[in-house]
Image (cartoon, rainbow, N blue to C red):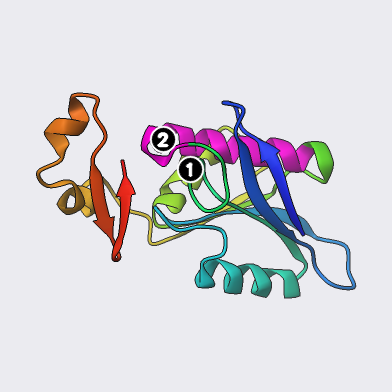
Amino acid sequence: MLLTFTNRNGYELSASLELPVNQHPHTFAIFAHCFTCNKNHTAVQQISRALNVNGIAVLRFDFTGLGDSEGDFAETDFSSNVEDLRAAAHFLEENYRAPGLLIGHSLGGAAVLAAAAQLPSVKAVASIGAPAGPAQIEHLLQGKLEKMLAGESAEVRISGSKFKV
């Protein structure tokens, strides 16, 4: 089921809630996609469906400025991703049930680790390939870091697509 929820900055974030078929959910999970990916990334969909078969409802959403969500990706950062996760958790708690599980891929994995400490309902976290630090993305920012530190945006190419950061 497609839906939207509002983040702290007033942007509508696009989401998909997949509920288990023929059973009540054992728990609700939030899936945070990778840097510059979106909620419809093949791996995100396949993992969500596997969890559904096992009775877990999964909310997949697009971070601010990505996929079908509002906002400018260039104006986001790691902290805003964590805030988007908190907004997703608040949406679930208000409309269904507070999430018991956070799942994140790559940078989404790092974000769920940071968000988990702020969400008392979370009992488990699964991180898939989360970076241990900024070294994993430094090569993407070569020649652009000074411009970014001066408060300007820069264009980077990731997997053949251009993104303004």
Q: Secondary structure at mark 1?
A: loop
Q: Amino acid at mark 1?
A: Gly
Q: Is residue 56 left or right of residue 101?
A: right
Residue 117 appears in the rendering: no
**Disc marking residue 76:** 2
Work out whether residue 132 or residue 3 is closer to the camera in this orientation and state it. 3
**First reached walking from the N terminus: tag 1 or tag 2:** 1
Please name the predominant secondary structure of the magenta segment in the image: helix
At which x and y percent is residue 39?
56, 59
Asked if residue 76 lies in the magenta stretch, the reply is yes
User: What's the residue at 18%, 24% (across, down)?
Assistant: 150
Where is residue 118 drawn, in percent x and y? 57, 32
Asked if the residues shown at circle 1 and circle 2 are in contact, with their CB atoms under 8 angstroms apart, the answer is yes
User: 10 Å neighbourhood of mark 2: few (<14), some, or many (≥20)?
Assistant: some
Q: Nearer the viewer, mark 1 or mark 2?
A: 1
Query: Seen in the image, is 76 located left or right of residue 18?
Result: left
Magenta part of the chain? 72-93
The kind of secondary structure element at disc 2 is: loop
Q: Amino acid at mark 2?
A: Thr
Which residue is painted at 24% across and 50% down in the image?
Answer: 156
Image position of 129 with respect to 12: above or below = below
* Quarter occupied by the N terminus: bottom right
Label 1, on which residue? 65
